[in-house]
Structures are given as structure tokens and as C-alpha cells.
């Protein structure tokens, strides 16, 4: 039987690339996000390319009160059976602005951490009661160690990674799988103008999507993508704090 999969932040560059792979292997997709026109175009593309079932659903991560009814709406659209959820929404804040303005700081934490935690709880409760399903959530390698250039973003993603670790531990007895996805640099609209897409350290959304799709199928716990970021972060985490605090990173 084909899987019903909900994608939150479905307009993201990484989400669109994963959606292509999920649709190609027969998943029925709910594409959830804020830009209805763009999502409808993406859904139409998936229907044409893969003969897939793909439907756009309105979702604003910052509308906290909508999270529970939004999930009920998704369940209704899937006749009460949702196999998997991929959470891709996020924002890369300006670190300097976050240091100056509380509103920017709060926005970064609200989108990257609080909203993700809030929407995942009704989803987790449902999957726990149905005793099956998977959750795949994008955090970031930036959460593995705080650096002066982006520690607000890093702290929000670190919080999300720890939240997912606890959720995985909670859901293990019910057979629900939780995948923490930690991409390095990816060429999407989030990093446009900040990264050189030709750099060997910058991955394409499709390369990252291939890793994510495989990790979902293999029920991995934590994915670094591309693979070499696991080693890079191992080195970065192992630098003693007395040295690390002096580095300009
Ligand atoms: N690109 C990288 O180098 C990189 C590295 C590590 C981790 N990540 C993470 O990967 C994930 C996907 O990012 P991306 O690279 O694919 O960037 P992207 O294309 O800019 O996608 C970000 C998505 O988040 C959505 N979003 C932001 N605020 C939202 C809200 N309030 N409600 C609903 N959706 C909201 C945006 O929707 P709108 O279109 O409506 O604005 C957009 O679709 C993010 O969590 C990001 O932090 C990215």
C-alpha cells in the first residue's frame, strides 16, 4: 500500500527535492506551507511527472493555535492514516540583528525550535496511538557547536536536535521512528548569495534529498548529509573549549 506523507515547509528547496523522490516511489503527498500558489504548482508538477497524488495544504508554522486543527485536517484528507511526516521549515537569521533586536532573536527561535516542537507534539501523539509511522526532521550541523557567526540559529537547531532525541526515546516502544537530519551547506534560497554553489562543501538539494530518502527507508536515527559533515563535526566538537573560544568561526 502506498504511504501517505505530510511535508511541512514543502516549498523549501530541500523539501521539493525530497518530494520528487517520495512521489517517484509512489507516496501520496500533502504539501504544507504558506505560499499556496507555489505549492499548487509543485503539486501539479509531481502529478504530471510521477502520476502521484499531491495536494497543497495551508500551513503557517507561527500560527501556534492552528497546529492541532491543521493536523486533524491532514488526517481527514488521508482517511485517518498518515505514515510519515517530513519537517523542513526553518529560517536562517542575521546573527548581528539577533544580537541587537529581541524580535529577531525570538523569531529565529520561534520558527526553528518552538513551532517545530509545537506541531510535532500532536503528530507524535497520533503516531504513538497508531503504533506506527516515521518523523524526519531537518535540524543542522550548526547545532553541534556554537560559533560566534551564527550561534542563535545554532542554539535553536541544537534545541530541536535534543527535542528529537527525547521524542525518539519516547516513541521507541510504540514503533514510531524519528530521524534527525543534519545537513551541512546546501544550495537553496536560504543560502543564496552566502555560499558559492560550486564549492565542494556545498551540496545540491538533490544530493541531500537522496540521503534523506535513504535514511527514512533504512530507519536511521541521525543523518549527517553529505556524509563528510559527520567527520568535520567530530573534529570541531573535539577541539577543547579553551582553544575553541579563541577561534574566529
Ligand atoms: N540550506 C542550507 O545550507 C541548510 C543547512 C542546514 C540546515 N538547513 C535547514 O534545512 C531546512 C530547509 O531549508 P532550505 O535550505 O530548503 O531553505 P529554503 O528553501 O529557504 O526553505 C525554508 C522554508 O521554510 C519555510 N518557512 C519559513 N517560515 C515558515 C513559517 N512560519 N511557516 C511555514 N513555513 C515557513 C519557507 O516557506 P516560505 O516559502 O513560505 O517562506 C521555506 O519553504 C531548514 O530547516 C534549514 O534551517 C538548511
Image (cartoon, rainbow, N blue to C red):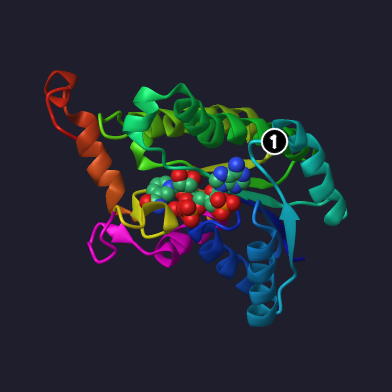
Q: Residue at x 35, y 41 (%)?
A: 141
Return the x and y of residue 56 as percentages of the image width and height: 73, 60
Q: x, y (%) of residue 125?
A: 75, 33
Q: Is residue 205 magenta?
A: yes
Closer to us: 167 or 150:
150
Circle 1 SS class: loop
- Is 211 left or right of 77, judged from the image as shown? left
| Residue 193 lies within the magenta run | no
Q: Which residues are magenta?
A: 195-217
Residue 225 appears in the rendering: no
Q: Where residue 102 appears, x then y in whole percent?
A: 46, 22
**Is residue 240 found left or right of 182 in the rendered image?**
left
Q: Residues within 10 Å of mark 1 (few under 14, many from 20)?
A: few
Per the image, the residue denoted by label 1 is 63
Name the quadrant of the C terminus.
top left
Q: Is residue 103 visible?
A: yes
Amino acid at each position: 500500500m502506498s504511504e501517505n506523507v505530510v511535508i511541512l515547509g514543502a516549498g523549501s528547496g530541500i523539501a521539493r527535492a525530497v518530494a520528487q523522490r517520495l512521489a517517484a516511489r509512489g507516496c501520496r503527498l500533502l504539501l504544507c506551507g504558506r505560499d499556496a500558489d507555489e505549492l499548487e504548482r509543485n503539486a501539479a508538477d509531481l502529478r504530471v511527472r510521477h502520476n502521484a497524488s499531491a495536494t497543497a495544504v495551508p500551513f503557517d508554522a507561527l500560527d501556534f493555535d492552528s497546529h492541532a486543527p491543521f493536523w486533524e485536517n491532514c488526517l481527514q484528507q488521508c482517511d485517518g492514516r498518515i505514515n510519515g511526516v517530513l519537517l523542513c521549515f526553518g529560517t536562517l537569521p542575521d546573527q548581528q540583528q539577533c544580537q541587537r533586536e529581541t524580535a529577531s532573536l525570538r523569531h529565529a527561535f520561534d520558527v526553528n525550535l518552538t513551532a517545530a516542537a509545537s506541531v510535532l507534539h500532536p503528530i507524535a501523539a497520533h503516531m504513538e496511538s497508531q503504533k506506527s509511522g516515521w518523523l524526519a526532521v531537518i535540524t543542522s550541523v550548526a547545532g553541534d557547536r556554537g560559533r560566534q557567526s551564527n550561534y542563535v540559529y545554532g542554539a535553536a537547531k541544537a534545541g530541536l536536535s535534543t527535542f528529537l532525541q527525547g521524542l525518539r526515546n519516547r516513541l521507541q516502544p510504540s514503533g514510531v521512528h524519528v530521524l534527525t537530519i543534519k545537513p551541512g551547506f546546501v544550495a537553496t534560497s536560504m543560502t543564496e548569495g552566502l555560499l558559492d554553489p560550486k564549492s565542494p562543501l556545498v551540496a545540491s538539494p538533490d544530493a541531500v534529498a537522496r540521503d534523506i530518502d535513504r535514511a527514512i527507508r533504512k530507519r536511521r536515527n541521525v543523518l549527517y548529509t553529505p556524509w563528510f559533515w559527520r567527520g568535520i563535526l567530530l573534529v570541531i566538537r573535539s577541539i577543547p573549549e579553551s582553544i575553541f573560544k579563541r577561534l574566529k568561526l
